[in-house]
Amino acid sequence: MATFVLAPHSLSPATRLKDAAAVAFIALLLGIPMIGLTTVDQGGALRVATRWPTLFAFVAVAFAGRLILRYGIDQFKARQLTRERAEAAVAPVGGRAGSPLLTWVGWAALGIAVALPIIFSDNRYVVDTATTVLIYVMLGWGLNVVVGLAGLLDLGYVAFYAVGAYTYAILATQFGWGFWQALPVAGGMAATFGVILGWPTLR
């Protein structure tokens, strides 16, 4: 029977629950305007409608997903620590094996990511919401590169996103460009302005 050593930086079950609850609370705050509330056309006038069951399901998925992810990370760190201690005493014979749980979670996430656009392709609300979520995810990743990795506190980072958005809007509305035609040009314009403003700052 395999014995796992708890890594020093692993979280206790109570701490995992608190961490998952914090993620669920953030998901609730973000989900209220994006999922919990929507507008419907009623007799030519817009009316605000609520979608609380969908919102609560979203929060529950966020809570469970964070809990499973945190558990998988802790188990991976524990196995890694055990393996490193064993390799320090005995010369390694073969290559390292990855965590089966994390491998399964990764393949499952990939399958869900591929299946969801196909399943909800006819639901315009879901497609628009998912598009908005992914846009903010990409903005968060970019901000992590600028602030987290480069160490540059750039509060005007979103301006580059605005440059790309306006470039795409102008090309699509004024020049009749298609999505795939305007997309690389808009991204190139945003990157160009980022280089122009970022290069002197880094120097």
Image (cartoon, rainbow, N blue to C red):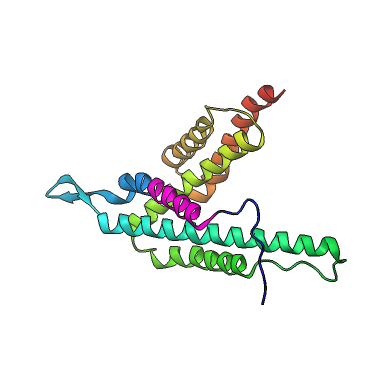
For image coordinates 83% across by 60% down, the residue present is 88
Magenta-span inclusion, residue 89: no
Measured as percent of width and height from the top left, residue 69 is found at 53, 59
Residue at image x 52%, y 27%? 156
The quadrant of the image that shows the C terminus is top right
**Residue 66 horizontal/vertical position (percent):** 48, 56
What residue occupies the far bottom of the structure in this picture?
1
In depth, the one of 36 and 189 nearer the eye is 36
Residue 41 horizontal side relative to residue 83, left or right: left
- The reply to whether the magenta stretch includes residue 19 is yes
189 on left or right of 61: right
Q: Is residue 53 left or right of residue 180?
A: left
27, above or below 114, in the image: above
- For residue 159, say whether it is visible: yes
165 up-or-down from 129: above or below: above
First to last magenta residue range? 12-27
Kindly report the secondary structure that dominates the magenta region of the rendered protein. Answer: helix
Residue 114, position as x, y percentages in the image:
51, 65
In the picture shown, does residue 91 fall above or below 152?
below
> x and y percent of residue 164 in the render?
51, 37
Name the image quarter holding residue 153: top right
Q: Name the residue: 61% across, 62% down.
A: 75
Q: Quick one: which residue is furthest to the right in this view?
A: 91
